[in-house]
Amino acid sequence: MDVTEHVESVYAELRRRDPGESEFHQAAAEVLHDLEPALRKHPEYVDARIVERLCEPERQLVFRIPWTDDRGEVRVNRGFRVEFSSALGPYKGGLRFHPSVDLGTVKFLGFEQIFKNALTGMPLGGGKGGADFDPKGKSDGEIMRFCQSFMTELHRSLGEHTDVPAGDIGVGSREIGYLFGQYKRITNRHEAGTLTGKSVAWGGSHVRTEATGYGVVYFLQEMLATRGRSLEGQRVVVSGSGNVAIYAVEKASALGATVLACSDSVGYLVDEDGIDPELLKEIREVRGQRLPAYAEARPNARFVESGSVFDVPCDVALPCATQNELNREHALTLVKNEVFAVAEGANMPCTAEAIEAFREAGVLFGPGKAANAGGVATSALEMQQNASRETWTFERAEERLATIMRDVHARCRATAESYGGASHDYVFGANIAGFLRTADAMVAQGLV
Ligand code: GLU
């Protein structure tokens, strides 16, 4: 069978079957496009229809989440869990609570997760979930009741050997706590390894909170080192100001970079003195305020409501907010301002056209499924600690994270080269490396 035709027919079929799922189409197109050299080298993957099988989730759950708000009114949201692939381990991936969440979003995230998790080298399958619930402006009681209702339905599908959710946008350690509490109550099992991102006080891992942001910066460090550069003195721009952004700012600053800007959904913050990670954390996480409060507290900081954070000239850009936040125009502005490297902290923050613009301009580009793999990798470390009933020190967990990110980086480069690409083509390397590990397991496990 002609490999190009095979891949094209799989892509056409998934678009035909699920016409409304544009983000899933985008995520699939990016991967499928890169797989041809692997399929040529391994005809057994084509015979076993690995690509076709990988594009179809093993199981998709869509469910009703009824809950009552503080006025006693009944509210109904929609919940999702897409159990995409269990070839390498239990389904693993976060939960996103955001009004934009629909099945297509969860499928794109779950699909990416398969390759990301495989790339870490750890025993993790791929999945993702969430709800179209908007946590903004909700009271603590409302969040708890929502999480309890969500888990009342989802608990029957979970388990430390079956499906292990964690956080994502809108789901942090508070939500994981409420979800875990309800899981424990219903099942009567303190099965710590069923959820990751737990608080360190009761089964969580040190560094899990910081892991995605720190991991992005470790990956970036490796990318820069291939060109003889370090983070020292680099001007960095980060988008977003949530969990990933905050810890990317913290680690980049600690390694000598000046982080000039970050953003929220209303605008962006510029601090010519370099963003102070402690103040940012205090404002966003402790006080729950927005970025203008930071600008008021620092002499050389300003909050800008028009334009984009990517207008700020920089050497390194770290998109850490959400999917498709960085388009071709933003990419061209960054290129014009001589950006040197871009690493994705969020999942699919750059559009396909933006990635193309970076590629054409020779900008080093680290895709999310490699650069932001530190979060899920540290979830695997949390599962490991739960299984052995141990708690590692912060230093030990961080050292493991740093090693994993170095390995992910090396794996991307080596795989890209051995399949005929350039070693700095991290997109190609990540796609092929993630695919090979999953595909080999699928062939070995037969037609299931
Ligand atoms: N939501 C994170 C991601 O996109 C983490 C998933 C996890 O820890 O399971 O990779």
Image: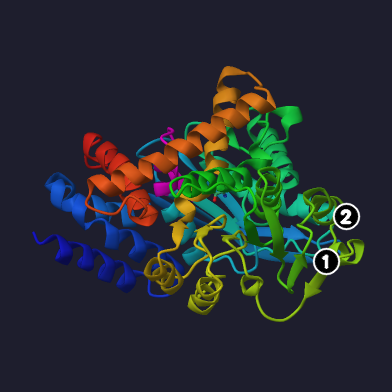
The structure residue drawn at horizontal position 75% and vertical position 67%, both measured from the top left corner, is: 270
- For residue 115: magenta? yes
Decide which of 203, 120 is in the foreground and name it.
Answer: 120
CB of residue at label 1: within 8 Å of ligand 1?
no
The residue labelled by disc 2 is: 287
State which region is magenta: 114-127
Q: Spatial distance from mark 1 to mark 2, Cα to Cα?
A: 19 Å
Residue 372 percent coordinates (x, y): 53, 49
| Frontmost residue, 282 versus 26 | 282
Q: Amino acid at mark 1?
A: Ala
Q: In the depicted view, which residue is nearer to us: 141 or 375?
A: 375
Residue 390 pos. (x, y %): 63, 18
Q: Is residue 442 visible?
A: yes
Mark nearer the N terminus (1 vs 2): 2
| Viewer-side label of 1, 2 | 1
Q: Does the residue at mark 1 contact the one at mark 2 (Cβ under 8 Å)?
A: no
Quarter of the image for residue 34 reads bottom left
**Which residue is drawn at the image coordinates 76% and 67% (left, top)?**
269
Give the image location of residue 66, x and y in percent. Answer: 69, 59
Quadrant containing the C terminus in the rendered view: top left
Under circle 2, the secondary element is loop
Residue to which mark 1 is pinned: 301
